[in-house]
């Protein structure tokens, strides 16, 4: 803020304007290295995310909210009708969907989506840092540390983990809401409920992180005896707000779990080898590996602050946040016997490197409080730290971006090959239906051997249906690569007439000699009432927070 005022030659400019300019500037800078050269280096996971967002976009183009099932765009190694929309929250993804609806060039639309996501992260981080200090110098220090660390940019651009990146964007508000509730602020439960609700609408695993974080924070309040009936009431209000905002997503997930059996994401637990971690740290390696880091500048600051904390007996608020960050840092390394927990629910985490979202959050708060409370700080020290944090992540992202050009498992995504890449690139096969009798996933493995490409051809897809042309020289049974789920209603139209499938999870029918059209269409797989309730709850909660912020 100080440097922007210098640029404008000390003229009196509304602080909100300067804040807005800084948010736009930092969000814009955050996007540039990932799209340099007019292409995007798309990861294996990124294909999965862009496929599902393209399906959501197609639904809105057709004037409908998305079905639970993905027909228009499904992974090429999966099948039309896979229930990605049901299991992977997409409401927060409207940040990417709206530009895709408005802008013809889909690569530019993707860049705009990332711009808005970065702006959202910056705004939420700024809101949290403003709780600890009113000095712009320290607020923006915290914003830059939280926005530009390597972990965040690996999530955004190396892994293209869009769901996790949304979880990262909302986590500052989770902490802010908890802190506001702790001081009995009226806005506290609304902030916490809003943040948790939006995480529900973004990423299932991030919900787990948020709930564990909230549980540990509140346990600490109980131990400190900072827990009373008002605190409980505010937590219950937050729960209600979160359910109203995330109710649409929660209902979809519950319905699929209650009715069908499906292929879940892999359950495993990969800790971080310290040697690999520090090697990646020194090399500023931001490529897609299980041991990604949050960057050398932040690790050095963490070490320096740890030494300072160790050598001073006087209690300081920043020390408690630093201790929390250090404990979580130690937990993610392979020093501990994580292999003994491979059969526990912890395998939902998959990669312990994901714990860095908590490390970065706690460390950022420690840094801000340390500088804000120190009497010996000079602006040039803060500026140097900010520059190093930015340079490491931006340069590392650019190097990753250039190194992965046309190198599997990354793809060179351009405006010309955008949809071709989504339709032909391999990605995850999560959420395909599993046969309840055999326990085998349908549409992959042995089940695809029943498909005969000689007698059918796919001719059309919509957001909720797929159409085939079947050509046979005799009466026979034909099995088509379109999946269905137990407990959900479908229309199977053979030459315009309803028929029944001989299988629960695949389309298997008898046809006579000649040419036939077959359409598989999902029925009643949209819940408009809950969707509108979630959207209305988001709007109302936002307005309430803005109103209560004044008091």
Image (cartoon, rainbow, N blue to C red):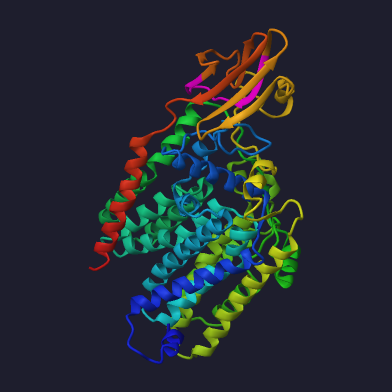
Q: Is any atom of residue 131 visible in this view?
A: yes
Please tell me in which quadrant of the rendered image residue 402 appears.
Answer: bottom right
Q: Is residue 61 left or right of residue 339?
A: left
Which quarter of the image is occupied by the N terminus? bottom left
Residue 413 coordinates in the image, percent (x, y): 66, 54
Residue at the image position 45 percent from the left and 62 percent from the top: 120
Residue 480 coordinates in the image, percent (x, y): 65, 22
Residue 223 coordinates in the image, percent (x, y): 40, 59
Q: Is residue 423 magenta?
A: no
Q: Is any atom of residue 442 visible in this view?
A: no
Q: Is residue 482 magenta?
A: yes
31 in relation to 457, above or below: below
Q: Residue furthest front?
A: 514
Residue at the image position 43 percent from the left and 41 percent from the top: 249
Please tell me in which quadrant of the rendered image residue 446 appears.
Answer: top right
From the viewer's side, name the closer residue of 313 and 421. Answer: 421
Q: Is residue 363 left or right of residue 457?
A: left
333 in relation to 458, above or below: below
User: Number of marks in the image?
Assistant: 0
119 in relation to 144, above or below: above
From the viewer's side, name the closer residue of 342 and 403. Answer: 403
Q: Is residue 493 left or right of residue 454?
A: left
From the viewer's side, name the closer residue of 441 and 20. Answer: 20
Which quarter of the image is occupied by the C terminus? bottom left
432 in relation to 54, above or below: above
**Range of magenta residues:** 478-491
Residue at the image position 70 percent from the left and 42 percent from the top: 426
Residue 507 coordinates in the image, percent (x, y): 60, 19
Q: Is residue 396 left or right of residue 232?
A: right
From the viewer's side, name the closer residue of 73 and 446. Answer: 73
């Amino acid at each position: 803020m100080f440097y922007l005022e210098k640029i404008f030659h000390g003229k009196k400019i509304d602080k909100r304007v300067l804040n807005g300019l800084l948010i736009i500037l930092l969000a814009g800078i955050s996007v540039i290295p990932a799209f340099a050269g007019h292409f995007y280096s798309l990861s294996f996971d990124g294909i999965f995310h862009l496929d599902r967002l393209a399906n959501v976009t197609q639904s809105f183009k057709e004037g409908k909210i998305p079905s639970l099932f993905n027909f228009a765009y499904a992974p090429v190694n999966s099948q039309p009708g896979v229930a990605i929309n049901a299991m992977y929250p997409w409401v927060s993804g409207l940040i990417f969907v709206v530009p895709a609806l408005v802008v013809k060039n889909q690569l530019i639309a993707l860049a705009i989506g990332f711009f808005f996501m970065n702006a959202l992260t910056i705004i939420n981080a700024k809101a949290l840092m403003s709780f600890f200090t009113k000095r712009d110098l320290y607020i923006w220090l915290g914003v830059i540390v939280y926005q530009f660390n390597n972990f965040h940019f690996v999530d955004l651009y190396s892994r293209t983990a869009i769901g996790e990146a949304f979880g990262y964007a909302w986590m500052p508000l989770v902490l802010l809401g908890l802190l506001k509730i702790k001081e009995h602020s009226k806005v506290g439960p609304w902030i916490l409920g809003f943040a948790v609700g939006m995480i529900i609408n973004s990423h299932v695993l991030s919900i787990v992180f948020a709930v564990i974080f909230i549980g540990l924070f509140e346990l600490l309040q109980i131990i400190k005896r900072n827990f009373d009936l008002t605190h409980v009431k505010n937590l219950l209000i937050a729960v209600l707000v979160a359910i109203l905002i995330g109710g649409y997503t929660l209902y979809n997930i519950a319905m699929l779990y209650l009715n069908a059996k499906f292929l879940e994401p892999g359950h495993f637990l990969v800790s971080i080898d310290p040697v690999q971690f520090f090697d990646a740290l020194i090399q500023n390696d931001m490529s897609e590996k299980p041991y990604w880091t949050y960057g050398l500048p932040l690790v050095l600051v963490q070490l320096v602050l740890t030494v300072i904390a160790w050598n001073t007996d006087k209690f300081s608020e920043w020390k408690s946040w630093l201790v929390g960050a250090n404990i979580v840092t130690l937990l993610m390394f392979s020093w501990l016997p994580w292999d003994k927990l491979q059969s526990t629910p912890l395998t939902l985490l998959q990669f312990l490197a994901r714990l860095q979202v908590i490390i970065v959050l706690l460390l950022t708060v420690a840094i801000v409080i340390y500088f804000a409370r120190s009497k010996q700080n000079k602006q040039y020290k803060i500026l140097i730290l900010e520059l190093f944090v930015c340079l490491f992540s931006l340069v590392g992202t650019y190097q990753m971006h250039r190194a992965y050009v046309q190198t599997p498992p990354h793809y060179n995504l351009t405006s010309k090959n955008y949809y071709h890449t989504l339709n032909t690139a391999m990605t995850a096969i999560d959420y395909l239906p599993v046969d309840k009798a055999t326990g085998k996933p349908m549409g992959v493995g042995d089940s695809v051997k029943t498909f005969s490409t000689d007698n059918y051809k796919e001719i059309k897809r919509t957001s909720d249906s797929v159409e085939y042309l079947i050509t046979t020289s005799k009466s026979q049974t034909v099995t088509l690569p379109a999946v269905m789920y137990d407990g959900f209603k479908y229309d199977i139209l053979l030459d315009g007439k309803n028929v029944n499938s001989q299988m629960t999870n695949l389309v298997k029918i008898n046809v006579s000699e000649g040419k036939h059209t077959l359409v598989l269409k999902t029925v009643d797989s949209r819940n408009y009432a809950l969707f509108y309730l979630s959207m209305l709850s988001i709007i109302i909660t936002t307005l309430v927070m803005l109103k209560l912020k004044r008091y």
